[in-house]
Every structure is written in structure tokens, then in C-alpha cells.
Image: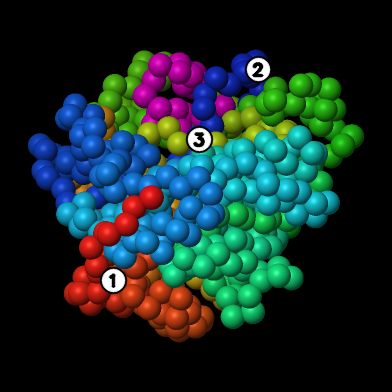
């Protein structure tokens, strides 16, 4: 249950009639990027336009805008034996794809290389077996499906779920995907064992009582597809619980003072900082009070959706409309803001959650409309208006979908550098007004066992930013430069990128940042001496040269 001290810090809210939200509570957490771009009148052509004809012979990433491989290069094994035979009988580069959500450079297959293949794991899905403490799933089972299956047994994942439910389980652990909360870390940290086809075609168990001692689970859990292909994932599970998400709005001063304290006392904490107005929106998610009316209402319902409080806060409404206007300009999409004109006035200052009621909390600004016909990028920010507390299962509060193509970047900082790094970002924001049309996202996690997890050496706070793509596949002209500038700032504070999102590899000193980098590199060299499972992009990160890998490739001589 949330502490009384934290409850007393809540922003005072304006009471308005309850309206069931029809807005998709979507917090995007993936990337859509490419290696080249072309100018298009104030915007940059970042990807294949929706108006351009896509080749039916090419597989594109999740958003349908960036090519990954030719369909003729893709294989769909149906069993572990078939997959092992495929790996043994081919001799070129091997990449793996699940839902196609990750930063596509890590899985892009050279389309001019006849020996390169892309393995789709779409046939490796579902619950294989379950004990009272663990469950084994096929590698391509989605997070949504894992949650659903565990829920039928009144169980849940013993970690905070991330935002993306359609991501595969193996893909989520491979890239270090995470939720939020210092009392847990990432999906990889609930893994107890893996079944893996190694680069030589051997099928092995990693971790658990039957795992090979020379293949550490901590190395394989987050390995970005470089150590082989995962076929099964065994995870721990826990009794299902009901949570309450307490929402508050504060200013940046209070955010800097309270963020670490919130994380030290609340199970799951997520924050959005809007630098244009210095308002901060906070979600504090904690076990629900079983005696509360909200818990009783949820328990008495069909439980297919969270229970929404009748009291709402309009403290962020003006900021929401300001960001929607910027988003409309940047994505060249129409936004109906006729309900409130933000062009002639500045947003109200954010109230302190420890102060007496302020005018902004009692604002009479009409709430933004929740018309689902609006382009989805607007709905992702409009959900912050008229904020209401929620009570339900953790995934109903924290796990939402991906609404729109975007470039998404997320950098993990040592938690001890949170304040100084945020102040540096604020200085950048003050000098670069209107560069972002979505707030910075803050999610902290505890220490991770995985060697290549940015939290391996201790607690971190992930700082996320994104730029939405327009329908024609373009982004604002300075979009990629914004991504680079922010990464450069955070790298100075020991920042490390999320492996599954957009990042500039040249900005980071990976070998010195990861304590087990050398151990992982040695293991990778031992299990894959020819570098077949090392993509072009990751080859640049891990020091292998394209020339050496190319020289060792052999023609594709056998296919299933």
C-alpha cells in the first residue's frame, strides 16, 4: 500500500464528472530508423513513405517503413530439430526476427548477400509446461500472451511489464527490455533457463540444474542474438496482485527532489517531464488497498479493464494542448484544438504537490476531446489530460500498445547521476525550444544479473525520448540531430543505450562501461568464432570487421 507520506504529496485535483476514457493509453517504446535520409521541404525522408509502393518481396519492420530482408532469405523452422539442421547446413550470416520491433539495424540482413539468412521464430509459441514456480514458453510467445496465460492460473510475471505487449518473450530478454521500479530489473532477470541452438547447430540448455556450466545464463539472457537462437524461455512467476496507480502533477523542482525517494518507497514509478513548461506527470503504482472502494469495485467487475477514479486532475491540460500543437506541426497531421486555444497564452504553472490548491489545479480549461478518429500520436499525449487514478492488474496499467511509427531512444544512467543529468537536459531544452513534441520519459530499475544489461553494475534510470514520423515517412529536419545531441549529453554522465532502440554506437565506450564486456566478448568468440550471428551493425559495436566476416562466408549450399 502507498505510504501516507507519499499520498500527502499528491497534486490537488479538480473534480469533474466522470467520463470513461476512450483514449488509448499508449506509451511508445520502440524505434523506427534507417541508415539514410533525404530532405523533403523542412522534413527529412526517414523511411519508405506510406504513399510509396513497398516491394512484396521484402519484409519490413513493425511499422512497415524500413526493410529487414528479402522474403527469399527468410526461413520458418517448425521445430528445434529443424532449426538446428538449418543452422548446420547454412554457412552465411544468420539474423533472427521476432515481432520486428527492435532497432532494425541489429537484425537487418544484407539483401545483396545470397548466403545470408533471416530466421523467423513465429512457429515457436505457447506454453510448453508449467510448475508451481516456473513456466516454459516458446521463444516467440508475445508478452501479451504470457501475461494472459499466467493470468488464467491467477499468476503474473514477477517484474514490472514493459509498455509493449506484442514483443516476443525472447526478443524482450535479448534486448534488455524492462519496465520500471527499483525492486526489480528487466524481463531477463526473471529467466531461470533457456533452450538455445548454438551457432554450430548444437541444441543446449543454458541455466537451471541441467544447464551447461560453460554457458552462463547471465551472458545468454541479454545477448542481442549473438550467441545463438533461443527456442524456449523458462521464467519464474508469482501470485497475481491488484495495483493502484496514483497520478500526480508537479514541477521540475519537486521532481528533482522526490524522484529517488519515490522509487525507494513505491513499487513502480514512471515519470514524464514536459520541458517546454517544466511540468512533470507522475505515476506511482503500488499494491492496492484491499479495503478501498476502488479495489472493491474492480474485484466486483469482470476485471477486463482497470477501474477509473471519478476524480480527475486538469493540471496538465494546457501543456497537453501545447504539445499536441507542436506534434501537429512536426508530423503534418491535423489536430482539433478548437476546445481550447493555447496559441494566445502560456500554460499554467504546475502546482507543487505539497502546496495549497493553485489556480492550475482548478483550471476551467475544457478537457481535450478523446475522439479515436484522431491520429494516434495525439492520443498518446492526450491521455495525460484529465488524469484519473487507476486500479487493476499491473499490465492493465503499465502495458500498452504501439500506436504510430517513431524514432525512439532510451539511455540508462547510473541512478546517482539522475539530478545532474536532468539539469543538463534542462539547459539543453532551454536553449533548444520546441525541438521535442513528446516529453522525456523516466523509468528506474534495480541491478540486473545480465552481463550486457546497463543496470548490471547497479540501479539505473532510463531516460527516453522519441520523435514521431509523419505519414509520408519523414521526420522534422533536426529530428535525428536532436537524438544525437541528447545522447551525447547523457553519455557524459555514464549513459548506456537500450539495445533494442535507436542509438549512435560511436557515442559510447562500451568496453569500459560494462564490467563483463571482456568475458562476453570471449564467450561470443568461443561459441561463434566465424561471427555468423554478428550483424553488420553489432559488428561495429563489438569490434569485428566486415572484411573478415565477408572473407569467411561461404555460398548457401543447403536449404530445408
Q: Nearer the viewer, residue 84 or 392?
A: 84
As measured in the structure, the alpha-carbon distance from the residue carrying label 2 to the one carrying label 1 is: 53 Å
Work out whether mark 2 precedes mark 1 in sequence or the reverse, and give the earlier one. Answer: 2
- Please, what secondary structure does the residue beneath circle 2 have? loop
As measured in the structure, the alpha-carbon distance from the residue carrying label 3 to the one carrying label 2 is: 24 Å
The image shows residue 54 at horizontal and vertical percentages of 21, 33
**Residue located beneath label 1 in the image:** 540
Q: Which residues are magenta?
A: 365-386
Numbered tag placed on residue 401 in the rendering: 3
The image shows residue 261 at horizontal and vertical percentages of 67, 60
Could you tell whether 221 is left or right of 541 in the image? right
- Please, what secondary structure does the residue beneath circle 1 have? helix
Secondary structure mainly formed by the magenta segment? loop
Report the mark closest to the observer, 3 or 2. 3
Report the mark closest to the observer, 2 or 1. 1
**Residue located beneath label 2 in the image:** 18
Report the mark closest to the observer, 1 or 3. 1
| Quadrant of the rendered image containing residue 255 | bottom right
Amino acid at each position: 500500500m502507498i505510504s501516507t507520506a507519499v499520498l500527502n504529496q499528491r497534486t490537488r485535483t479538480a473534480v469533474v464528472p466522470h467520463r470513461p476514457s476512450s483514449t488509448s493509453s499508449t506509451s511508445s517504446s520502440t524505434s523506427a530508423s534507417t541508415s539514410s535520409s533525404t530532405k523533403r521541404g523542412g522534413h527529412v525522408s526517414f523511411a519508405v513513405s506510406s504513399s510509396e509502393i513497398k516491394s512484396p518481396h521484402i519484409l519490413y519492420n513493425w511499422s512497415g517503413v524500413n526493410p529487414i530482408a528479402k522474403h527469399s532469405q527468410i526461413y520458418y523452422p517448425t521445430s528445434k530439430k529443424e532449426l538446428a539442421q538449418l543452422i548446420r547446413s547454412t554457412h552465411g550470416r544468420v539474423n533472427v526476427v521476432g515481432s520486428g520491433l527492435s532497432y532494425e539495424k541489429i537484425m537487418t540482413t544484407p539483401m545483396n548477400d545470397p548466403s545470408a539468412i533471416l530466421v523467423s521464430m513465429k512457429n515457436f509459441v505457447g506454453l510448453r509446461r508449467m510448475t508451481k514456480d516456473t513456466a516454459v514458453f516458446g521463444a516467440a510467445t508475445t508478452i501479451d500472451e504470457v501475461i494472459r496465460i499466467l493470468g488464467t492460473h491467477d499468476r503474473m510475471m514477477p517484474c514490472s511489464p514493459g509498455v509493449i505487449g506484442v514483443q516476443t518473450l525472447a526478443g524482450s530478454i535479448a534486448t534488455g527490455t524492462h519496465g520500471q521500479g527499483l525492486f526489480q530489473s528487466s524481463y531477463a532477470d526473471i529467466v531461470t533457463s533457456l533452450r538455445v541452438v548454438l551457432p554450430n547447430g548444437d541444441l543446449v540448455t543454458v541455466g537451471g540444474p541441467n544447464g551447461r556450466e560453460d554457458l552462463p545464463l547471465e551472458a545468454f539472457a541479454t545477448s542481442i542474438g549473438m550467441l545463438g537462437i533461443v527456442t524456449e524461455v523458462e521464467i519464474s512467476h508469482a501470485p497475481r496482485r491488484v495495483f493502484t496507480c496514483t497520478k500526480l502533477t508537479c514541477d521540475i523542482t519537486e521532481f528533482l527532489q522526490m524522484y529517488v525517494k519515490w522509487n525507494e518507497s513505491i513499487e513502480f514509478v514512471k515519470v514524464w517531464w514536459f520541458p517546454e513548461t517544466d511540468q512533470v506527470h507522475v505515476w506511482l503504482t503500488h499494491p492496492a488497498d484491499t479495503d478501498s472502494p476502488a479495489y472493491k469495485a474492480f474485484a466486483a467487475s469482470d476485471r477486463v479493464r482497470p477501474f477509473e477514479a471519478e476524480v480527475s486532475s486538469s493540471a496538465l491540460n494546457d501543456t497537453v494542448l501545447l504539445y499536441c500543437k507542436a506534434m501537429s506541426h512536426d508530423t503534418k497531421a491535423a489536430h482539433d484544438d478548437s476546445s481550447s486555444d493555447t496559441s494566445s497564452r502560456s500554460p499554467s504553472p504546475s502546482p507543487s504537490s505539497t502546496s495549497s490548491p493553485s489556480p492550475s489545479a482548478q483550471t476551467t480549461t475544457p478537457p481535450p476531446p478523446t475522439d479515436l478518429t484522431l491520429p494516434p500520436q495525439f492520443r498518446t499525449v492526450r491521455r495525460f489530460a484529465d488524469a484519473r487514478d487507476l486500479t487493476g492488474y499491473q499490465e492493465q496499467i503499465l502495458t500498452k500498445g504501439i500506436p504510430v511509427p517513431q524514432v525512439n531512444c532510451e539511455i540508462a544512467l547510473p541512478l546517482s547521476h539522475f539530478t545532474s543529468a536532468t539539469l543538463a537536459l534542462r539547459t539543453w531544452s532551454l536553449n533548444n525550444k520546441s525541438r521535442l513534441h513528446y516529453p522525456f520519459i523516466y523509468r528506474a530499475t534495480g541491478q540486473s544479473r545480465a552481463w550486457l544489461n546497463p543496470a548490471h553494475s547497479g540501479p539505473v534510470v532510463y531516460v527516453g525520448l522519441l520523435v514521431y514520423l509523419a505519414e509520408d515517412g519523414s521526420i522534422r529536419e533536426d529530428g535525428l540531430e536532436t537524438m544525437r545531441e541528447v545522447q551525447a549529453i547523457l553519455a557524459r554522465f555514464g549513459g548506456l543505450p537500450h539495445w533494442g532502440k535507436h542509438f549512435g554506437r560511436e557515442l559510447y565506450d562500451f568496453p569500459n562501461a560494462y564490467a563483463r564486456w571482456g568475458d562476453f566478448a570471449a564467450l561470443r568468440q568461443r561459441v561463434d568464432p566465424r561471427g555468423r550471428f554478428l550483424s553488420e551493425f553489432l559488428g561495429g559495436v563489438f569490434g569485428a570487421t566486415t572484411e573478415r566476416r565477408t572473407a569467411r562466408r561461404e555460398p548457401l549450399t543447403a536449404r530445408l
